[in-house]
């Protein structure tokens, strides 16, 4: 599903054009349309421009890399296999922007939310030295679950959040499913998503970490605890957040920070960057998944229900589109940032 979302988002992109598609040997030798057959999962039609592209064998690294300037990677393989594959592509001198979790804790691989930690791209110089390449590297996108609440917390980061409790309510597309192929999710809630809670608690600390001579060292604060729940919605991850701060802000200060927050993508005017990164709704019943997941073409974060809490300083609800901002769209924005900052150059 993430691969299909990449295809859809890159249609008519002003900077990037899909020129090659690679997958397992089982799909190689077929056109993209033939390889997908009846498995196109998006509500929008498959772009005409990719239908006749011949799918290549992703294991033939040199062949695939020869004709592209960068690679978006989203594969279903064992973690060590993904690590080896992505590093092999990077060693050909090709930048790899990964949607996979395999390299999220590799010290010299930046894990980036472009509005939050663009300075982590500096670690690429260390990675290139390790891999023995002047132009290749790997950059990764963090887990989709944290995109819904990390931006709202980051906008308040100078108030020094100390304790954060989050429950996420995650869409079935996060598992690569629709209601057609996962009917068990209709009228159902599953209070467990394998590995998701550890990622949701630890990955924000790496994003808030520091670049050192040993790579990126994660932050020790805030302490985050989470529960991740699968709910019967097609797209959109919602988070219920409770937070305490070393320096408690006023409600007015929080709303001002959210409404005015701008990051590097907005300053650069990147094509996929939302103009309004965080949108706060004053209505008591917003944000709603169905109404608000597509805000800013699915790249914005929506928030609501900010109020003081009896145990923590504040509580609120926030929402993001998990396969756009949380997956393929977030990776495309990383690629745009890398290109704008001079990390991605044409090979020819």
Image: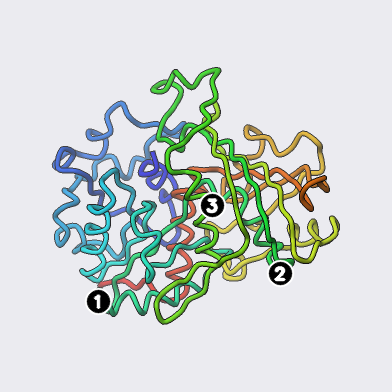
Q: CA distance from mark 2 to mark 3?
A: 20 Å
Sequence-first disc among 3 and 1 = 1
Judged from the image, the secondary structure of the residue bearing numbered disc 3 is: helix
Q: Are marks 2 and 3 in contact (CB under 8 Å)?
A: no
Q: Residues within 10 Å of mark 2 (few under 14, many from 20)?
A: few
Could you say which is closer to the camera, residue 299 or residue 194?
Answer: 194
Could you say which is closer to the camera, residue 24 or residue 344?
Answer: 24
Judged from the image, the secondary structure of the residue bearing numbered disc 2 is: helix
- Pointer 1 residue: 133
State left or right for residue 223 relative to residue 68.
right
Residue that appears at 46% across and 31% down? 43
What is the number of the mark on residue 201? 3
* Position of the C terminus by quadrant: bottom left
Sequence-first disc among 2 and 3 = 2
Q: Position of residue 294 (x, y in %)?
A: 60, 41
Q: Residues within 10 Å of mark 3 (few under 14, many from 20)?
A: many
- Pointer 2 residue: 158
What is the number of the mark on residue 156? none
């Amino acid at each position: 599903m993430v691969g299909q979302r990449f295809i859809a988002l890159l249609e008519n992109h002003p900077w990037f054009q899909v020129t090659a598609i690679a997958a397992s040997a089982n799909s190689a030798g077929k056109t993209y349309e033939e390889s997908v057959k009846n498995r196109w999962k998006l509500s929008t039609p498959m772009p005409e421009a990719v239908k006749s592209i011949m799918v290549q064998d992703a294991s033939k690294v040199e062949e695939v890399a020869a004709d592209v300037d960068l690679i978006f990677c989203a594969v279903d393989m064992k973690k060590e296999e993904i690590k080896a594959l992505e590093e092999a592509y990077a060693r050909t001198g090709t930048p790899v922007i990964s949607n996979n979790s395999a390299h999220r804790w590799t010290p010299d691989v930046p894990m980036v939310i472009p509005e939050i930690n663009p300075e982590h791209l500096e670690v690429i110089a260390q990675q290139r030295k390790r891999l023995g390449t002047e132009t290749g590297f790997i950059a990764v996108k963090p887990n989709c679950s944290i995109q819904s609440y990390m931006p709202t917390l980051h906008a308040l980061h100078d108030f020094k959040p100390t304790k954060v409790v989050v429950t996420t309510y995650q869409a079935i597309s996060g598992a690569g499913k629709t209601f057609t192929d996962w009917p068990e999710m209709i009228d159902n809630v599953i209070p467990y998503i394998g590995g998701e809670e550890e990622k949701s608690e630890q990955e924000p600390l790496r994003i808030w970490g520091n670049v050192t001579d040993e790579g990126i060292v994660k932050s020790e604060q805030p302490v985050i605890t989470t529960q991740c729940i699968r709910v019967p919605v097609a797209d959109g991850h919602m988070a219920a957040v409770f937070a305490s701060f070393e320096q408690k802000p006023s409600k007015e200060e929080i709303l001002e920070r959210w409404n005015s927050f701008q990051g590097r993508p907005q300053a650069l005017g990147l094509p996929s960057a939302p103009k309004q990164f965080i949108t706060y709704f004053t209505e008591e019943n917003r944000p709603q998944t169905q109404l608000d997941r597509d805000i800013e073409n699915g790249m914005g974060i929506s928030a609501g229900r900010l109020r003081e809490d009896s145990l923590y300083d504040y509580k609120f609800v926030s929402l993001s589109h998990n396969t756009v901002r949380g997956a393929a769209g977030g990776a495309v924005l990383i690629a745009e940032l890398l290109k704008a900052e001079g990390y991605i150059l044409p090979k020819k």
